[in-house]
Image: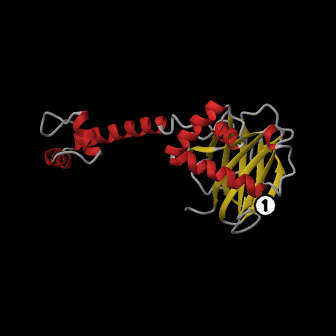
């Protein structure tokens, strides 16, 4: 395929078009030229990947946000993070959510002092990775082969800890759902538990097995909050949709 009206549009013209700043001649050319339209689509995909890689590159890690909330950061680092929060709506929202979330959990959790644990807010890094996830959750026989409600696992990251979550229809409870999870990045799962809340009410608490797997069945469609807790770590996943699209 070749440009129908050479010379073909260069990257500068195509980027201006994608930003809504192209002149009428460029827009008219793209309407008529399949070659330049395809070139624009390829450039848009590259730009999207670069944007995804750079997104929130300068934001503090979930660990730093947790330590800031607990007052554990050195004075200079805390001051720098406070300045960042004043300018970054994303981190400000996460910090407020973490504070409110921990306040809600205090009466329900029989845990050691929070100062002993790393408090992390997990971030969604992938919704449906191609080719599946290496080391996917070892599904219990009741759920093996059941079609999931989503195209692939949701992958959450908090420092070195990664959590893969799949939502499936519960084969034993029509109209209900099950969460299947896999935790990686930890050396020891022996005291790790998973807690699930819905509308500030605890729905389930269960241990994570020695391979890092957990299954939470019989869930109504709703938005949930999930937390992993261990002797030295807390990982929070907020606004986990189960059986809902919004």
Q: Is residue 211 left or right of residue 159?
A: right
Position of residue 205 measured from the top left corner of the image (x, y, whole percent): 82, 54
Position of residue 223 measured from the top left corner of the image (x, y, whole percent): 65, 61
How dense is the environment of label 1, judged by Cα within 10 Å: few (below 14), some, or many (20 and up)? some
Q: What element carries label 1?
A: strand
Residue at the bottom extreme of this rendering: 175
Rendered view: 2 above or below 207: above
Q: In this view, does 57 lie to the left or right of 33?
A: right
Residue 79 placement: quadrant: top right
Query: Residue 219 or 137: which is nearer the viewer?
Result: 219
Q: Is residue 239 left or right of residue 211?
A: left
Query: Residue 6 or 193: which is nearer the viewer?
Result: 193
Residue 208 placement: quadrant: top right
x 63%, y 56%: residue: 239
x 79%, y 45%: residue: 229
Rendered view: 58 above or below 165: above
Position of residue 175 measured from the top left corner of the image (x, y, whole percent): 69, 69
x 17%, y 48%: residue: 32
Q: Is residue 122 visible?
A: yes
x 68%, y 55%: residue: 100
Position of residue 237 measured from the top left corner of the image (x, y, whole percent): 67, 49
Location of the N terminus (image quadrant): top left
Name the residue carrying label 1.
202
């Amino acid at each position: 395929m070749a440009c129908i009206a050479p010379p073909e549009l260069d990257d500068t013209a195509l980027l201006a078009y994608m930003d809504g700043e192209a002149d009428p001649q460029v827009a008219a050319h793209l309407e008529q030229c399949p070659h330049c339209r395809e070139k624009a689509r390829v450039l848009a995909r590259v730009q999207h990947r670069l944007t995804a890689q750079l997104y929130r590159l300068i934001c503090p890690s979930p660990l730093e946000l947790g330590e800031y909330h607990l007052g554990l950061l050195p004075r200079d680092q805390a001051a720098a993070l406070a300045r960042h929060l004043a300018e970054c709506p994303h981190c400000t929202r996460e910090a407020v959510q973490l504070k409110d979330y921990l306040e809600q959990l205090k009466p329900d959790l029989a845990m050691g002092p929070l100062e002993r644990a790393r408090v992390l807010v997990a971030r969604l890094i992938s919704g449906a990775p191609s080719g599946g996830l290496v080391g996917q959750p070892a599904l219990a026989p009741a759920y093996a082969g059941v079609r999931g409600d989503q195209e692939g696992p949701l992958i959450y990251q908090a420092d070195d800890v990664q959590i893969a979550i799949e939502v499936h229809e519960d084969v034993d409870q029509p109209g209900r759902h099950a969460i299947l999870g896999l935790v990686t990045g930890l050396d020891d799962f022996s005291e790790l538990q998973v807690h699930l809340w819905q509308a500030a009410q605890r729905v389930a608490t269960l241990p994570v097995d020695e391979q890092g797997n957990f299954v939470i069945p019989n869930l109504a469609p709703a938005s949930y909050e999930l937390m992993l807790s261990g002797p030295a770590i807390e990982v929070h996943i907020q606004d986990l949709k189960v059986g809902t699209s919004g």
